[in-house]
Image (cartoon, rainbow, N blue to C red):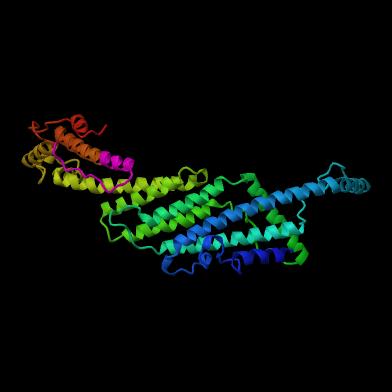
Amino acid sequence: PGTEGGGLFEKAMGGDGVHLEAPAGLASGAAHGSGRGGGNSHGKGLALVLVYRLSHLLAFYRLTIHRLLKSEEGRTDYSKGTAKASKDLAVDGGDPGSSALPSPLRSPLRSPLEAVLAECHALAGDVVSRMLSSLSEALSRSSSFPLDLSAGPNTAEHMRRLAEILTVHSDSFLEAQDWRDLDQLDRDQAAEGEANDGKANDGKAEGRGGSDVEAILSAFLEPLLGACRRSASGRLDAADEATLLINTASAMLGSIEAFEAATGWVGKLQLEVKHWVQVLVGHEAQKVLERSKLGPLLSRFEVLPPELPAANQPGLDPATVESAMRGFYASLFALVMPSFDRLQPLEERSQARRGIAKAIADAHAKVYEEVSDPKNEYADRSFLLHSPDQVRMLLDCD
């Protein structure tokens, strides 16, 4: 019966348990990546959602029917088994309350219907795994990015598919304990098959529950993120690369953050966004500081040996420092700050602007401190027109 059931399922799935043709007119070969160059990845995403939904449905019916059948067996056979086990234990001097008594929910013996459902569920799990591998490979081959440095339609499309899969998982009738029960059922039935056939279990029956959402998230997100990094590296400057990665990672984050099962990847993407915001701020802040002449001045102070008075060093003489500071104060109300118009997430755009303002204010505070330090021997400090707190207020750092 198991073979017959599996054959029926394979026929419905396209003849070999891999192809998907009938449902919704899906292209054949989607499960093993027959599309060239990843061009069929949208079709694969659609097919994957359907097969994943089917896998969950099979899991639900398989576990439900197993419990119902075992419960029925318990009502009809449990009293007989208890009496026999008690008698045997009494003869052997055992404890009638021992765990040797039969349990209707622990017996791995299967009815023909259970065998069919188990095989169909296993085949659905195989198809999901193969489709994930194929989709991941197709996504990793992407090497282009939109001119506006947005996440792009390809990322948006696959994030919609991933959200649909996560919705199937979150709306499942099966709870976490049910998935654990299914995995235990797999192990019990694999052990039963090993005992009957005399063959060692190859491990394929274990973990067929379809509850490994982490693998599905990784199959979508890792190749998309990796392809984005590779396509930007060496082709964009630091600011544009950071902008592209922030937009892409933020789009991914927005698609999955509402799902409890995606908590791990939400944390990873938040760190990704934070890293690239720091890269963007550092790059743009350096450019602003160079234009304001504060950057070169700060660099010289940072490499100055502490035992040497700064006023006596080339590039840090009083005339040079005064000229640079007066120029900075004069441009303070007219600093050309990056607009970050191509940065799509508003929160990250605001963070980048605040980060640059803070970097400029910190640089001014450092120079101000060095000039005010008596050991650096600046006799005239009248050109320090604004205190660090005043500059922070003018730059709206708080």
Instruction: Write down the quadrant of residue 108 in the picture.
Output: bottom right
Q: Identify the residue at image location x=64%, y=45%.
A: 177
**Residue 299 shows in the view:** no
Above or below, 61 relative to 132: above
Residue 55 x/y as whole percent: 60, 55
Q: Is residue 66 left or right of residue 131?
A: right
**Residue 297 shows in the view:** yes
Above or below, 392 relative to 218: above
Q: Identify the residue at image location x=31%, y=57%.
A: 146
Q: Is residue 302 left or right of residue 330?
A: right
Q: Quadrant of the N terminus?
A: bottom right
Between 231 and 288, the one lying in front of the other is: 231
Instruction: Write down the quadrant of residue 396 in the picture.
Output: top left
Residue 26 x/y as whole percent: 51, 63
Between 160 and 232, the one lying in front of the other is: 160
Residue 345 in the magenta stretch? The answer is yes
Q: Identify the residue at image location x=28%, y=57%.
A: 147
Above or below, 135 relative to 263: below
Above or below, 334 relative to 124: above
Instruction: Farthest residue to the left: give it.
Output: 319
Instruction: Write down the quadrant of residue 375 in the picture.
Output: top left
Residue 264 in the magenta stretch? The answer is no
Q: Which residues are magenta?
A: 333-355
Between 39 and 195, the one lying in front of the other is: 39
